[in-house]
Image (cartoon, grey):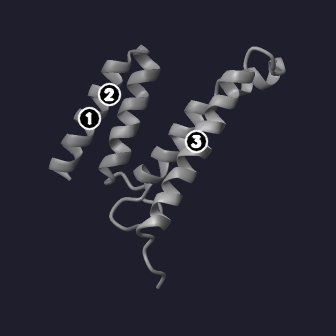
Amino acid sequence: MSEPVVGIGLAVVIVGLALTTFLTRTSFLLAGSRLRLNHRVEVALRYAPVCTLTAIIVPDILQHGGAAFDLSPLNPRLIGALAAGLWLCWSRNILGCLASGMIAYSLARVLL
């Protein structure tokens, strides 16, 4: 096992990560007015938040009860996600989507 980073090493790591984050984020702000992206790249970047959210949420929904991928109808997370997705496709109402997903998930946890 490796030893935990403490003291001056921890401070160096924190400062290094802070500088890296600062430089990468401010580079786009400073060069944004001078640097123009291709139209196709701008259109593709519109999908980045949806892709990121999907990559975070889908594994959590499908890994239920220790199984690698639980696609069974007894998975309450999957039931809630499907209910939220159907509501959103039907009504385009985000608040209703959240409410229907949470209600379906809660009922599935209690009843299954």
The label on residue 69 is none
Of mark 2 and mark 3, the one earlier in the sequence is 3
Question: Percent position (x, y) of residue 34?
Answer: 80, 16
Q: Which residue is mark 1?
A: 102
Q: Residue furthest front?
A: 8
Whether the residues at callouts 2 and 3 have beta carbons within 8 Å, the answer is no
| Total marks placed | 3
Question: Percent position (x, y) of residue 61?
Answer: 41, 49
What's the distance in space between the residues labelled 2 and 3, CA to CA? 32 Å
What's the distance in space between the residues labelled 1 and 3, CA to CA? 35 Å
Q: Residue at x 40, y 37 (%)?
A: 82
Q: Choose mark 1 or mark 3, whichever is in front.
A: 3
Whether the residues at callouts 1 and 2 have beta carbons within 8 Å, the answer is yes
Image quadrant of residue 99? Answer: top left
Amino acid type at circle 2 is Leu
The label on residue 98 is 2
Q: Nearer the viewer, residue 57 or 23?
A: 23
What's the distance in space between the residues labelled 1 and 2, CA to CA? 6 Å
Q: Residue at x 44, y 15 (%)?
A: 92
Q: Left or right: where does residue 78 sit relative to residue 9? A: left
Question: Percent position (x, y) of residue 46?
Answer: 65, 23
Image quadrant of residue 103? Answer: top left
Q: Nearer the viewer, residue 81 or 74?
A: 81
Q: Residue furthest bottom?
A: 1
Secondary element at image label 3: helix
Q: Choose mark 2 or mark 3, whichever is in front.
A: 3
Of mark 1 and mark 3, the one earlier in the sequence is 3
Secondary element at image label 2: helix
Q: Which residue is mark 3?
A: 21
Vertical comparison of 89 with 103: above or below = above
Secondary element at image label 1: helix
Q: Residue at x 53, y 45 (%)?
A: 18
